Image: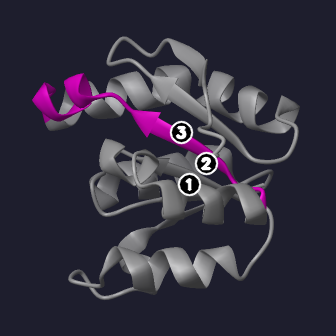
Amino acid sequence: MKIFFDNTIPVRIARGLEGFAAPDHQVIHFRDRFSADAADAVWMGELAAQQDWVIVTCDVRLGRNPLETEAWKAVGHCVFFLKPGWLRLGFWEQAQQLVKCFPRLIESAQGAQGASMFAVSASGKITKALIPSGE
């Protein structure tokens, strides 16, 4: 499984998870593929052109734009939205919580059917999020 952490999550956390998850899973951080100031449309467009990505982001507005939501649905990516409480955690608390919930995140992604969205609380609880129909 390929897991992409966007620019809202510290690079060091993604790289630490890459060390823990290898060789079974590949963890890529935004800055491993894009410049730090790359627009959402750029990285989202590139990942949309590829299959089998799991996206992890703290940017909850990504799930609120109907056009972007439809694009994710069409490609079939699984997206995990870290709820706003994550941004209030310090670096080490974020790292601890992500390490703690990472196995459940992987299990949820593996069990997902097609395009799926999940919400992850700051305590690490993962719940299935509804995908707007766009109708």
Tally of marks: 3
* Closer mark to the observer between disc 1 and disc 3: 1
- Residue drawn at (46%, 24%), measured in percent from left and top? 120
Left or right of 55, for residue 38: left
- Residue drawn at (45%, 46%), measured in percent from left and top? 63
The answer to whether residue 37 is magenta is no
| Disc on res. 69 | 1
> Which secondary structure, mark 3?
strand
Near mark 3 (Cα within 10 A), the count class, few <14, some 14-19 or many ≥20, is many
Disc 3 and disc 2: Cα gap in Å? 19 Å
Residue stretch in magenta: 76-90
In terms of sequence position, does the residue under pointer 1 or pointer 3 come before the other? Answer: 1
* Residue kind at label 1, given as amino acid type: Thr
From this view, report whether residue 42 is shown above or below residue 120.
Answer: below
* Closer mark to the observer between disc 1 and disc 2: 2
Tags 1 and 2 touching, CB below 8 Å: yes
Tags 3 and 2 touching, CB below 8 Å: no
- Residue drawn at (58%, 16%), measured in percent from left and top? 127
In terms of sequence position, does the residue under pointer 3 or pointer 2 come before the other? Answer: 3
From this view, report whether residue 3 is shown above or below residue 98.
Answer: below
* Residue kind at label 2, given as amino acid type: Gly
Asked whether the viewer can see residue 85, the reply is yes
| Disc on res. 134 | 2
Q: Mark 3 points at which residue?
A: 80
> Which secondary structure, mark 1?
helix
* Residue kind at label 3, given as amino acid type: Phe
Q: Where is residue 44 in the image (x, y as percent from the top left)?
A: 51, 74
Near mark 1 (Cα within 10 A), the count class, few <14, some 14-19 or many ≥20, is some
Quarter holding the N terminus is bottom right
Q: Where is residue 54 in the image (x, y as percent from the top left)?
A: 65, 53
- Residue drawn at (43%, 54%), measured in percent from left and top? 14
Disc 1 and disc 3: Cα gap in Å? 13 Å
